[in-house]
Every structure is written in structure tokens, then in C-alpha cells.
Image: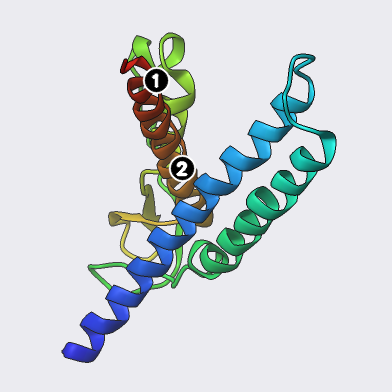
Amino acid sequence: MPGAFAGLAVKALKYLAGITLATIGVVFTVGPVVDAFNPQSEWYWWMNAGMFVVLGLLPLAGAVALLKRGATEIPPRRCPRCGSPEQAPAGVLRRSGFWVHLLIWPLGLLWRTSRRQQVRCLQCDELYFTETRGVRIACILLWVFLLLLLLGAIAEHLQERP
């Protein structure tokens, strides 16, 4: 039992480190690109390029290395009733609220796709939920987006202080 807990802890730490590195990489790839188009920038072009590569692309590469295996290698889930590995999409349509489409559609889209997908067992016709590669990738993007929003709110709060 302690070995299983340690394995889960290592996976969770890799996942958190990957999301943190992805967030840092996004900030430092977007920031220098935006600053490069600012005519009143105080930074030289080589400073922006260095920040883009060292603080932007390297953390993104590290995030991909940490998150790739967890996002792409999904163990097949068997039917909870009969144990069959054969499944098909359930075809159940879910309606979204009006707010998802107009007010916060990017966050709503990430939230919807980060949820588990409902499938139907081909042997016994049982409905159950399973993860897909798209679900894991959307979940990672959702957490990076939320962390960027949090960092933006913190930066704005710190700027308002006298």
C-alpha cells in the first residue's frame, strides 16, 4: 500500500510541475512577443529573444516532457458490469447553458471537454464514464488557463498598491 501511495504522489508532483512549467512557458513566450511589437519598449531585441527561448520555450519543452506520457497513455477502462473492454460512444447529448456560449465560451469549452466521456459497453449495453486523450489534454489546458488568470489577478492587485 505505501508503494502505491508513493507512485500516486510522484505522478501528482509530475503533473503539478508540468502545469507550472507550462504556465511559466506561456507567460514568457507571449510576453516577449507582445513586447517586440511595442514601439516604446525599453528592452533590446536580443533580450526579448533570450527571454523567449530560455524562459519561454525551455519550460514549455519541460512541460511537454513531464505531461506527455500522462496525457497520451490512457489505460483502457473495462465495463464495470461485465468486464468487456469493447466500448462505443454513448451518443448522449448534453445541452449547455446560454452563458457557456456567450459569456465565457473559452473557459466553458475547456470545462466541457475536460470532463469524462460517457461510453456504452458493446456486450451488455451498460453506460459508464471513461477518460480519453482529449479529456486529459483539455484538463491540462484548463488548469494552465486558470493559473494564468490567477497570476494576472495577482499582478493587477500588486500594481494597484501605492
Colouring chosen for the image of the structure? rainbow
Q: Position of residue 158 (x, y in %)?
A: 35, 25
Report the disc number at residue 159. Answer: 1
Image x and y of residue 108, in percent: 41, 26
Q: Tell me the kind of residue under disc 1.
A: Gln
Residue at the outermost right position: 45
Q: Quadrant of residue 9?
A: bottom left
Q: Is residue 81 above or below residue 144?
A: below
The residue identified by callout 2 is: 144
Front-most of residues 158 and 94: 158
Disc sitting over residue 113 in the figure = none
Q: Position of residue 89 (x, y in %)?
A: 46, 49
Q: Is residue 77 visible?
A: no
Is 43 situated above or below 104? below
At 32% across and 56% down in the image, what residue appears?
125
Which residue is nearer to you in this view: 149 or 109?
A: 149
**N-terminal label among 1 and 2:** 2
Q: Look at 67% across and 58% down and name the residue there.
A: 58
Q: Quadrant of residue 155?
A: top left
Q: Is residue 126 visible?
A: yes
Q: Residues within 10 Å of mark 2 (few under 14, many from 20)?
A: many
* Side (left or right) of 111 relative to 31: left
Task: Give the quadrant of the C terminus.
Answer: top left
Q: Is residue 59 above or below residue 162?
A: below
Q: Helix, strand or loop at disc 2?
A: helix
Corner quadrant of residue 38: top right
